[in-house]
Amino acid sequence: MPSAYFKFVLEQLGTTRALREAILEGTGVAPANVARLGEEITLGQQLRQTRNANAVAPPGWALAISAHLGSATHGVLGFGAVSAPTLRDTLELLVRYGHVRDPSFGFHLRNVGRKVRIEIHERLDLLDEERVPLIESFLLSLQALVESLLGRKIEGTKVEVSARPAHADLYRRYFSGTVSFGTEVSALVVPDSWLDQPSPFADPTLHRVSVLKLEAMAERLKGRRYTAALVEELMASGGQGGRPLEEVARRLAVSNRTLIRRLREAGTTYRELRDAHRRRLATELLAESSLTAAEIAYRLGYEDASNFGKACHRWFGRSPGALRKQRRERPRQRARRRHTSIGR
């Protein structure tokens, strides 16, 4: 998924060094490396950042910053949406390719009388602390998109929110229409007469190029490797110990047996993915923290520290202590080589 929103959240909320570090904790992105972050991040990184932001930002933070989102923040999906011929074409594009922006959600259009419901459906089983900020972002982005194409505030619309957050009273500041909570799904409801409104930003060439890129991205997500990638992302967002198989299956809305089968078709297993997750984190914690081997074992989900020691021998051919010494020696060795080279 595009990294623009990840960067935008960090820019808006990370106003101090401590806040930036807190918002990036556990995402695998160091504060010094944000500028070099590529065009895409994983779903796991996005979900972890969302939970971090909930812990340090004021209630309703997603509403406050999402009100300033532009089409560029949504990457190629945003460009394709604004360059479509009509609002109907824009919404149909979101239905086909909205999951490319965020695999955890998808858009649906449903006609109800003379109204059209632009519904936001979960494709994964998210926690409330992940779901609410993302839905707020989607709803405000939809409102901004429709208003930009119509060239005016969209009064007379209705916003439906499946949850009722503690900061529900803040919604009236950000939405032009009426807001109701506790609905079956979240949606923006607009008159169907608006859908054939020509877009003032219609650009056939840009739209065609955007659709081709979106199609390529969607095809990539259809591959067998996609399920494995989702498991990896959920594992990364679940803390240093990863997530149990049962939880991963529940959040992907499949049975344990189906998840095991899909991973087998992708050429891997849940155990292999969790093992890789633990190995990566073990390397980082041994090199960069002062935690003891027993403390690292506990954080990675090992009930017995000796099992962590056996895993290190299997992964690296050495004990945790020997691996830590090796990892910490490498920077000093590189520094000595650079010093020697300069001296010559």
Image (cartoon, grey):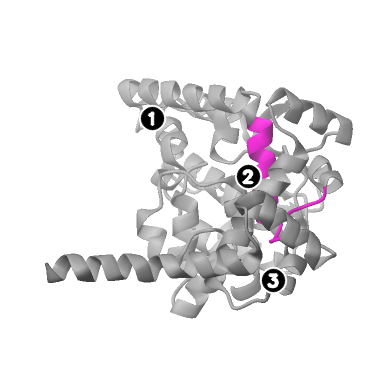
- For mark 3, what is the residue? 293
Q: In the rendered structure, does residue 11 fall within the stretch colored magenta?
A: no
Query: What residue do we see at 74% from left, 61% from top?
Result: 308
**Sequence-wise, which precedes: disc 3 or disc 2?**
2
Q: Give the range drawn in magenta.
A: 226-244
Amino acid of disc 1 = Ser
Q: Are marks 1 and 3 in contact (CB under 8 Å)?
A: no
Query: Residue 151: image x %, image y %?
Result: 41, 42
Question: How many residues crowd around disc 1 within 10 Å: few (fewer than 14), some, or many (20 or more)?
Answer: many
Q: Are marks 3 and 2 in contact (CB under 8 Å)?
A: no
Q: In the rendered structure, does residue 237 fall within the stretch colored magenta?
A: yes
61 shown above or below 311: below
Q: What element carries label 3?
A: helix
- For mark 1, what is the residue? 83
Quadrant containing the C terminus in the rendered view: bottom left
Q: Disc 3 to disc 2, how far (Cα)?
A: 57 Å
Q: Is mark 1 on a helix, strand or loop?
A: loop
**Sequence-wise, which precedes: disc 2 or disc 1?**
1
Q: Disc 2 to disc 1, how far (Cα)?
A: 23 Å
Left or right side of 284 for 125: right
- For mark 2, what is the residue? 157
Query: Residue 226: image x %, image y %?
Result: 63, 31
Q: What element carries label 2?
A: loop
Question: How many residues crowd around disc 2 within 10 Å: few (fewer than 14), some, or many (20 or more)?
Answer: some
Amino acid of disc 2 = Thr
In the image, 182 versus 57, the foreground residue is: 57
Q: Disc 1 to disc 3, how far (Cα)?
A: 55 Å
Amino acid of disc 3 = Ala
Predominant secondary structure, magenta span: helix
